[in-house]
Image (cartoon, grey):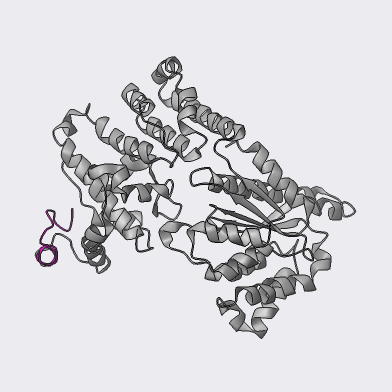
Amino acid sequence: MRGTRVQAISQIENWIDRRDGGTFWCRGMAGTGKSSLMATLHKRLTIQASDRLENEGEAGEDDRTSVSARGASLAAFIRYDRNTKPSADKLIPTIAHSLCGLNPSIYPDIRTAISRVVRDNQSVLDMSSSAREQFRLLLQRPLMNIRGPLEDKPSLVIIVDGLDECQVSNEMLAVLAEGFGPDLPFMRLIVSSRPHPDITNAFKAVPPSAQLYLDPLSKDANQDVQTYIRSRFQDIYKKAPALKSRCEALHAVGNFTLQAKGFFIWAVIVCNVIERFPYESSLQRVLDTPSNVTVGSMIYKTALDSIIADKNDNMELKEHILELKQYIRDALVVIVANVATGEPISVPTFKKVVARRRGGLEPFSVLEMLGSVLQVSDKGVIQPVHGTFFDFLQDKEKCGDDWYIDVEQEGPAVHFRLDAVEMGLDLDSPIVQNAYHALFPAAQDSPSC
């Protein structure tokens, strides 16, 4: 968001311009905004590349070299998500593939150089057992062969976000910590992660050329969170103008900033809740929520409880409020149990597995209710606003009996329903119903619930 992370972005961009080899490590606890920062950097680099192409088109032949030599280009953006249980085995080929897709009018030799390596030795694409050798053969050596022309081009930035969310070998960590080296100074590698022991040890062995710690207790973090909340609330006031005077009277922006304690995820969930439920009761409920530096466990519970509490004014649903709560929980079980296998669930599959309930509720309506904690990706996949939400649901001590999900116990019944849907079976058919209750006699619901 405009006005946030100004210092951090400036630090990273200054490092990119230095062209001194090595790796930039952005580290911070969960919920401190690492992925948001990487997304902002991604956007800025993309816009800069677009502007540069436009300027080159307008520049004369004599000016073209000097214009193209400025700035940086995004060469690759790899983001790991714990909900897909990813592995870093294909990281190096993925980077190579992205490099081959760069604009050939600016980087005409890269694709040829890498393609030649693959053509001569296809086994180089499947060398996960030797990350260092694969990195040397597939990336370093071909780039070294054409480095002369590349030194006059914009720096090539590779971003690896969420490295801590994937399975990664110590050898791969060592390769990433070393980066492309001083002989390829135009290659700029940025890694973002939590400070997990293995990653920390790798960067201790080979110190990064620069690093950034996103400290939630810093003054910058507090100001960024406040800027974010203030901006979000300005948008909320446009949709719910009556809420503005009450927010100002309660000093909502300032108090929410204090509650967040520098954690962006807290601010995001709070704003999502108020945006979804712009009522004074929601405002007071969130203000009464104890802040928690373990990232969001209390605010997640408040977000879920708000869905139920703010339906109490709907007389049609009031008599079914307990059923509504159970339905929302059932929907979360389907999502979390599926994600636990490393296969996030799509919206169409979710709608088939989660049946319509009384009160006119459709499965998609439940997704909308859960919009403060869940989101749908561009590919139609259901995912959490932050990975810690699914951790919260599987931690009974944090979420309590009402929202706790035991994947080991409840997962098999969910996967029965998912398998039936994939086979094209009707969940309400007698055959499926009988099989479901025979396999899961303790289940109180039907497979279509």
Q: Can residue 94 be seen in this view?
A: no
User: Which of the two residues, 190 or 360, is positioned nearer the viewer here?
Assistant: 190
Residue depicted at 61% across the width and 34% down the height: 220
Left or right? Give the position of 426 relative to 8: left
Going by the picture, which residue comes out furthest to the right?
A: 62
Q: Is residue 182 left or right of residue 196?
A: right
Residue at 76 percent across and 59 percent down: it is 186
Give the residues drawn in magenta, as a range.
Answer: 432-449
Instruction: Give the answer, above or below, for where 439 lies relative to 348.
Output: below
Q: How many labels does the image show?
A: 0
Q: Does residue 448 belong to the magenta stretch?
A: yes
Q: Can residue 303 be seen in this view?
A: yes
Please determine whether, in this image, residue 387 is positioned above or below residue 183. above
Which residue does the image show at 41% across and 48% down from the upper left?
388
Q: In this view, does 241 lie above or below 82?
A: above
Answer whether residue 433 is magenta in the image. Answer: yes
- Is residue 18 found left or right of 226 in the rendered image? right
State the residue lying farthest toward the bottom. 120
Residue shown at 21% from the left, 29% from the top: 314
Q: Quadrant of residue 9?
A: top right
Q: Where is residue 169 in the image (x, y as percent from the top left)?
A: 54, 69
Image quadrant assignment for residue 300: top left
Q: In this view, does 108 lie to the left or right of 379?
A: right
Residue 396 at what x, y percent from top left? Answer: 28, 47
The quarter in which the N terminus is drawn is top right
Where residue 193 appears, x then y in whole percent?
A: 55, 53
